[in-house]
Image (cartoon, rainbow, N blue to C red):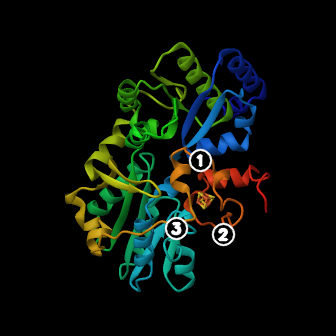
Amino acid sequence: MQYVDEYRDTRLARGLLADLARKVTRPWVLMEICGGQTHTLMRYGIDDLLPSQIELVHGPGCPVCVTSLETIDKAHHLASQPNVTLVSYGDMLRVPGSHTDLLQVKAGGGDVRVAYSPMEALKVARALPERQVVFLGIGFETTAPANAMTVWQAKRQGLKNFSMLVSHVLVPPAIRMLLRSPHNRVQGFIAPGHVCTVMGYWQYELLSREFRVPIVVGGFEPVDLLEAISMLVAQLETGRAEVENQYVRSVTRNGNSRAQEIMREVFEVCDRKWRGIGLIPQSGLRLRPEYAAYDAEKVFQLLDMTVEEPAECTSAEVLQGLKKPTECPAFGKACTPETPLGAPMVSAEGACSAYYRYRRHATVDK
Ligand code: SF4
């Protein structure tokens, strides 16, 4: 296990920047998928330090940002029921639905509780047997094993008052959607290190071969990201298109087989709607029929609904790397972290929030 300081070392970072400047001969557009990586890039000003030929665009890897408006509205509906306790991660509380957010539902008397792990929701369910306890289970492959384990435990313990509102999403189908788009400008991807820690990177080899695109699995510290960018540029400049692993201290080709096992036991792949983007085939996970008694959509007979996105929020283009947050007319004006119009301004991993927090809004007229 390495110390994190090494990955924030200024001397190493300068060396990688100098190496990049020597390597790059023409313009390249690169995308980091994960919102955590976006925040590191903004926080350390890495985008400003790169050679001018390298343009970074930001991908759809913020779990809060891509959770569909319909799922958020369903959570609001459940939290408003008198016999329901809704348990959620804290960053979901301020995500705007079509009418309200969970904080306002809570202020209006809804029983909404914040948890740091889904297992806490099981404790709440055991402590409140007279109430129905629902956990809002969202996120990428990273959080899926813990959510799967929670449902598996609920079944094993015979809990009758626990269910999960599941809206999991998968990274490889989203990359495929981006690469198939006629508007795509991305020539190389930094794949998310935490997702690949769970799932490995063999699925990305299929994408790399199919679309002849270089993909580097990257970590989350400044040196990790500079190294991943350097590896991508080396491939692009020499005409290679392969999957390489920068995040070797955490990621293997096949990932964590135990975590994948529990995911397969509890979840199955399904089509999923992504907020701002729309339906991406085979890009989600839902509970298997054997776990229907723990599926909040079935327990509460939540009907399919279609909700329109607010017209002023251009998060669809932001999440696909087609626009920078500062190109959204609402950025820093109608939309700020205090008055968010869209999820990318709420979440700690959202690109709009990263641009705002790290002062990329300094040039925006107020
Ligand atoms: S700045 Fe606000 S309104 Fe614009 S895309 Fe981001 S979240 Fe949506």
- Residue pointed to by mark 3: 310
Image quadrant in which the C terminus is located: bottom right
Q: Is residue 41 left or right of residue 286?
A: right
Q: Is residue 23 left or right of residue 48?
A: left
Q: Residue at x 59, y 22 (%)?
A: 233
Type of the residue with mark 2: Thr
Instruction: Tell whether circle 3 marks a residue whose Cβ is less than 8 angstroms from ligand 1.
Output: yes
Instruction: Tell whether circle 1 marks a residue whose Cβ is less than 8 angstroms from ligand 1.
Output: yes
Viewer-nearest residue: 305 or 127: 305
How far apart are the alpha carbons under marks 1 and 3?
17 Å
Q: Is residue 306 left or right of residue 276?
A: left
Q: Residue at x 41, y 66 (%)?
A: 71
Type of the residue with mark 1: Lys
Q: Is residue 160 left or right of residue 103?
A: left
Q: Residue at x 46, y 69 (%)?
A: 87
Circle on res. 323:
1
> Where ligand 1 lies, by quadrant?
bottom right
- Residue pointed to by mark 2: 339
Q: Earlier in the sequence, mark 2 or mark 3?
A: 3
Disc 2 residue crowd, few under 14, some 14–19, many 20+, Cα 10 Å: some
Type of the residue with mark 3: Pro
Q: Quadrant of residue 164?
A: bottom left
**Is label 3 in a helix, a strand or a loop?**
loop
Q: Residue at x 45, y 21 (%)?
A: 242
Disc 1 residue crowd, few under 14, some 14–19, many 20+, Cα 10 Å: some
Looking at the image, is 252 positioned above or below residue 158?
above
Q: Quadrant of residue 128?
A: bottom left
On the image, the x and y values in percent for residue 199 come to: 39, 37
